[in-house]
Amino acid sequence: MASLSSLFTTLPTTTSSRPPSFSKSACTSPRFKVSCNASSPDDQKDPKLTLLENVDRRNMLLGLGGLYGAANLTNIGSALAYPITAPDDVSHCVNVNVRNPVRGVACCPPASATAPKPYHLPQFSKLRIRPAAHRLTPDYVSNYKAAIAAMKALPDGHPHSWTQQAKVHCAYCNGAYSQEMNGRPDLKLQVHNSSIFFPFHRWYLYFHERILGKLIKDPTFALPYWNWDNPTGMMLPAICEEPGSDGDPRSNPTFDPYRNVKHLPPTIVDLQFNGTAESGLNCVDQMSTNLSTMYGQMVNSAKTTDAFFGTDPNPEIASKAGSIEGSVHNVVHDWVGNPRMPHGEDMGTFYSAGYDPVFYFHHSNVDRMWKIWKDLNPRRHKDPTSYDWLNASFVFYDENEELVRVYNKDCVDTRKMGYNYEPSRIPWVNSRPVPRIRASNVAARSFGDVKKAEKIEFPLKLDQIAKVLVKRPATKRSDEEKAAATEVLFLNGIKYNGERFFKLDVLVNDVDDGIETTAASSEFAGTFAQVPHNPGHEMFMTSGAQFGITELLEDIEAEDDEYVLVTLIPKAGAEGATVDEIKIELVPIG
């Protein structure tokens, strides 16, 4: 296997590094088959028993009127977080709440006569290697299609059927399960917008992959990944749209009728898609913007564990999505989904996303981001260590049709799970954005015209462009101080309508010159996006976002400024959306 040095290039050390350039000919060369033209039409303790003995290891909630006292410890849901726990009895499941669904409202798995048993990872003699979808061999394509066809041929009620595999995502992502095992039947289990996003989807893909391998009697079978972070893989995988044996794409097992026809190959994915309008960029600029987007999410805004994974689920405080989940993950979902369907089915809404094979390609690459993030800086990039994260658990049917319970702590090493990823270069590590204008004194010139955050009456409406002056915790920080703590812009308590795709762009010290600031510009702090959870029912949800701005401030020469100008630009679904708090803090690294 290639060494890390051959996979990752060195991070830029100067603030003037520009994104890699691409010639227009690169988009159409035989090696780089991309077109610029748009397409046509072991034993586990009961969590309750370990509550008191682990109080000292848990994070007591702050900011809720002070530290909760011992008198409240009997209420597991009021003073402390706890490990998210899927129910033993999977029949304790309700139908998804979707109006006018295309895929039906039933999301529950077949009932089991026995309770789930603890799952123990097998000893793997050979690693399964997940290949990049744009480099698949003919033999692999044949095997993959045979596996999907075999899964789709199973009766819908079979735990291994295509329908049941899709329902896994529907159940865990649309409130079909509650937390009755933690004494909170009123609290729905939700695997998005928190630190359990990555481990849940890793387990989901693991069993999906193992089932497909068993169906074709190939224990080495591995899922492909959609390499949307590399220019050579930024198109929707061709395997999903190529004709079947009879020349009709509908006979191709990986075909899905509910995809955006404007985004079929050879169109380049837009990692900043706003839900409706196309970017209008040529393929060269689109690739560069995509790479800058990846740099922002994997480097700038992912220097701490919480920033990358998101915060732990908590019944009292809205958790925050991680940098990948709350941006490119959600944007790609919406980019693939069909806007002509009632709710953007299939990929554009969580209840139906698992019906499209692209979902598994997409999430393989999302899972790959977890591994890459740790490999980029093994000393500082660490998995979460909280008791609640390590002991969060989910229930799946395994490849032997047995109901099993799995834990986060058992999925942090892909090699122990028997798989790895085919190497693919990550050019985005050299795609640090470039400032549009340096030392512009934007914040200072805004005094008197823009309110300071401490003077604003929150919540602040997000249905139109909003500008806020935000005080920084420190200025003129040394390199040693920057290495110890990163400066983070927090948007806390973002409320948005969960029935719609929602997207908000965040800029720092942007100038009003009539030119749009994109992810390729240093002033672009990042994006917060959300995929619909309960389409057809207006339901406001609460989350939050955080953006690393240490490098951004260096690049725009604003490190000496006491305040910065934060601009919030709603891009989609912002009607009624608000934010409760905007602040900047120093967050320790490592």
Image (cartoon, rainbow, N blue to C red):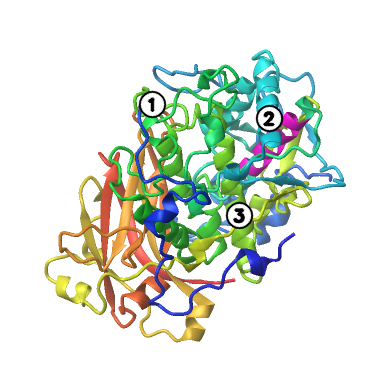
Mark 3 or 2 closer to N-term?
A: 2
148 with respect to 444 (left or right): right
**Residue 117 position in % (x across, y down):** 81, 33
Determine which residue is flagged by label 1: 343
* Magenta part of the chain: 201-213
**Residue 373 position in % (x across, y down):** 59, 60
Residue at 33% x, 57% y is 581
> What element does badge 3 sit on?
helix
Mark in the foreground, 1 or 2: 2
Mark 3 or 1 closer to N-term?
A: 1
Q: Amino acid at mark 3?
A: Trp
| Residue 103 belongs to magenta span | no
130 with respect to 475 (left or right): right
Examine the image and state in which quarter residue 394 appears. Answer: top right
Q: Is residue 221 above or below residue 511?
A: above
Determine which residue is flagged by label 3: 370
Badge 1 vs badge 2, beta-carbon distance below 8 Å = no
Residue toward you, 172 or 13: 13
Residue 581 seen in the current view = yes
**Residue 482 position in % (x across, y down):** 48, 79
> What element does badge 1 sit on?
loop
Determine which residue is flagged by label 2: 142
Q: Amino acid at mark 1?
A: His
Task: Answer few, some or many: residues within 10 Å of disc 3's Cα (few below 14, many 20 plus, some between 14 and 19).
Answer: many
Examine the image and state in which quarter residue 511 appears. Answer: bottom left
Task: Answer few, some or many: residues within 10 Å of disc 1's Cα (few below 14, many 20 plus, some between 14 and 19).
Answer: many
Q: Is residue 57 above or below residue 575?
A: below
Residue at 45% x, 37% y is 265
